[in-house]
């Protein structure tokens, strides 16, 4: 007796492009609509401390982008194997490993900047932005979108740091990236660098101005608390 075997045809859903509209939105949202500093109000402490010059601000921004992106990627890749009761510990171990790597690279190749950043590189471990994205995104999503979310969140943080760093160094020291911008004749005519820009309150004022500009341009953020 012959048995008719019907082979089931498995139809695979088309894979999502790496840079689909959804993934692009994940990458871009933290730059504006969901900025971790100006909308979520996270990472303020380091914004006050490391932004007296552009170079430390830039290096801090790159460091946070690196740690945020790769911690998101790693946690997302192993999320199904992490017991719920120790997930925070696992996340901290991953972040601490990446931060230690960043810290050692800075000490080896950019020692002067490392000294200026001081303990704030190590404090990336407890940065609410990184921990928040691991919990809210990487533990729920696939590795590639999580990686993009990490880049976007770090870049959104870095964008604010650079904005503050440019104004504080320019008006506080008369220079940018260590290069003198304000000419000598300006000082001879009575120009004086603004000492307030070298103090932490200046960063708060500048963050406030950034938030004001951002919400003036994007009315959807007006009611965001």
Image (tube, helix red, strand yellow):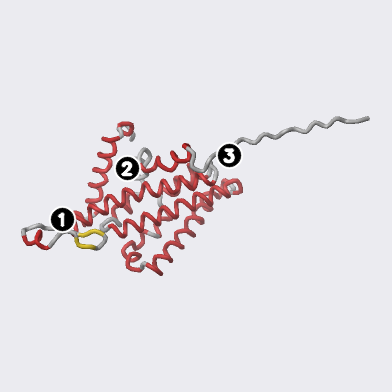
Residue 70 in percent (x, y) is at: 49, 53
Quarter occupied by the N terminus: top right
Q: Quadrant of the C terminus?
A: top left
Taking depth in this image into account, of 6 and 198 the one nearest to the observer is 6
Q: Secondary structure at mark 3?
A: loop
Badge 2 element: loop
Neighbor class of circle 2 (other Cα within 10 Å; few <14, some 14-19, many 20+) is many
**Do residues under tags 2 and 1 come within 8 Å of each other at their CB atoms?**
no
The foreground one among 120 and 63 is: 63
Report which quarter residue 124 is drawn in: bottom left
Left or right? Give the position of 185 relative to 16: left
Check disc 3 and report the residue beneath it: 15
158 lies left or right of 100 = left
Q: Which mark is residue 38?
A: 2
Residue 52 place in picture, x, y as percent: 25, 57
Furthest residue to the right? 1
Q: Quadrant of residue 12?
A: top right
Q: Which mark is residue 194?
A: 1
């Amino acid at each position: 007796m012959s048995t008719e075997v019907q082979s089931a045809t498995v139809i695979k859903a088309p894979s999502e492009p790496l840079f689909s509209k959804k993934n692009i939105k994940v990458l871009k949202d933290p730059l504006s609509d969901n900025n971790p500093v100006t909308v979520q109000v996270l990472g303020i402490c380091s914004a006050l401390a490391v932004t007296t010059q552009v170079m430390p601000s830039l290096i801090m921004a790159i460091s946070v982008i690196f740690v945020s992106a790769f911690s998101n990627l790693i946690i997302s890749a192993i999320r199904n194997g992490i017991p719920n009761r120790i997930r925070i510990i696992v996340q901290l171990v991953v972040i601490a490993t990446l931060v230690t790597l960043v810290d050692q690279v800075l000490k080896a190749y950019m020692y002067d900047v490392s000294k200026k950043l001081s303990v704030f590189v190590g404090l990336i471990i407890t940065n609410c932005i990184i921990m928040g994205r691991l919990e809210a995104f990487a533990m729920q999503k696939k590795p590639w979108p999580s990686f993009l979310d990490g880049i976007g969140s770090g870049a959104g943080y870095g964008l604010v740091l650079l904005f503050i760093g440019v104004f504080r160094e320019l008006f506080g020291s008369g220079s940018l990236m260590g290069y003198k911008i304000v000419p000598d004749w300006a000082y001879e005519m009575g120009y004086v660098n603004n000492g307030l820009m070298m103090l932490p309150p200046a960063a708060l004022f500048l963050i406030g101005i950034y938030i004001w500009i951002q919400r003036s341009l994007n009315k959807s953020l007006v009611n965001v608390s």
